[in-house]
Image (cartoon, rainbow, N blue to C red):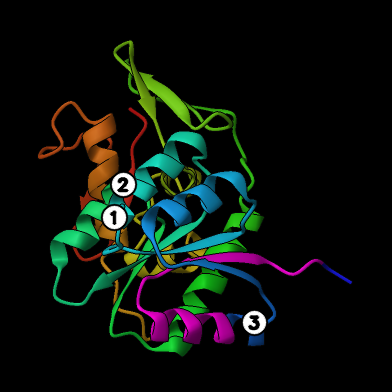
Amino acid sequence: MSQKPRILIVEDEEAIRVGLVDVFIYHGFAVDSAAEGPAGLQKALTGTFDMILLDVMLPGMNGFDICNRIREQDKDQPIIMLTAKTSDEDIVHGLTLGADDYVAKPFSVAQLVLRVQAVLRRSRNSAAGHDQIRLGDGIEIDILNLSGKRDDQPLSFTRREMDIIEYLFSHGDRPVSREELLNKVWGYAKNADIETRTVDIHIAKLRRKIEADSAQPRFLTTVRGAGYRLLVD
């Protein structure tokens, strides 16, 4: 029998937390939970979880700080943040800190389960097809170690960022649409009714890392009406 995927739910609203625990147990997960920020961080750093669901507003320590601390220790840990529906800044900030995705409150439980399963599928299937990628003369990317350098300045990437780089690189000059990235990198089903800015925000993060001028990208370019592509020269 295969081992159950392990999920940590860090949520201070008891009704939501208890409800999510029941939902994920029903869907075959082994579930742990925490109601406060410090307890959630301790469990995240000392336990082994396939997924962490992390609320933004928590007593004692907010979800942003927890996400940042987790990323300092583990760049690969799948994290989905739960954010207030009207707080666009929360969404951008959470993804900038390294969350794989976000789900806005109030959310559909069915959609949340689908998104957790999609991120887990992609995390398990993530395998580097190359060891190194060079962009121009000044950028080197080490896929296996999630690192690199730009003009001798060190770079650090999350697993999700590296998945995007790898996928775009593997498709050469062909533009890749947001929908294709959601399908192939995040694992969402084609034509899934999922509204997310995750792709755009991750692209913006990558440009700030690899481009000399993120407002006028040389390597990670936009093809109007078609998507994104990664140019190596």
Please give the label number shown on residue 62: 1
How far apart are the alpha carbons under marks 2 and 1?
A: 6 Å
Q: Quadrant of residue 68?
A: top left
Give above or below for 158 relative to 151: below
- Residue 120 is left or right of residue 94, and the answer is right
Magenta residues span: 3-23
Residue 99, position as x, y percentages in the image: 38, 54
Rendered residue at 38%/49% (across/down): 67
Would you name the residue on which mark 3 appears? 25
Would you name the residue on which mark 2 appears? 65
Residue 233, position as x, y percentages in the image: 33, 27
Residue 104, position as x, y percentages in the image: 28, 76
Residue type beneath disc 2: Asp
Q: In the rendered picture of this protein, how many numbered marks are placed on residues?
A: 3
Mark 2 neighbour density, 10 Å: few (under 14) some (14–19) many (20 or more):
some
Most distant residue in the left direction? 215
Q: Is residue 7 magenta?
A: yes
Q: Earlier in the sequence, mark 3 or mark 1?
A: 3
Viewer-closest of 214 and 104: 104
- Disc 3 to disc 2: CB gap under 8 Å: no
Q: Secondary structure at mark 1?
A: loop
Residue type beneath disc 3: Ile
Rendered residue at 40%/81% (across/down): 14
- Residue 214 is left or right of residue 153, and the answer is left
Most distant residue in the right direction? 1
- Disc 3 to disc 1: CB gap under 8 Å: no
Rendered residue at 31%/59% (across/down): 199
How far apart are the alpha carbons under marks 3 and 2?
A: 27 Å
Give above or below for 128 relative to 156: below
Task: Specify the quadrant that holds the N terminus.
Answer: bottom right
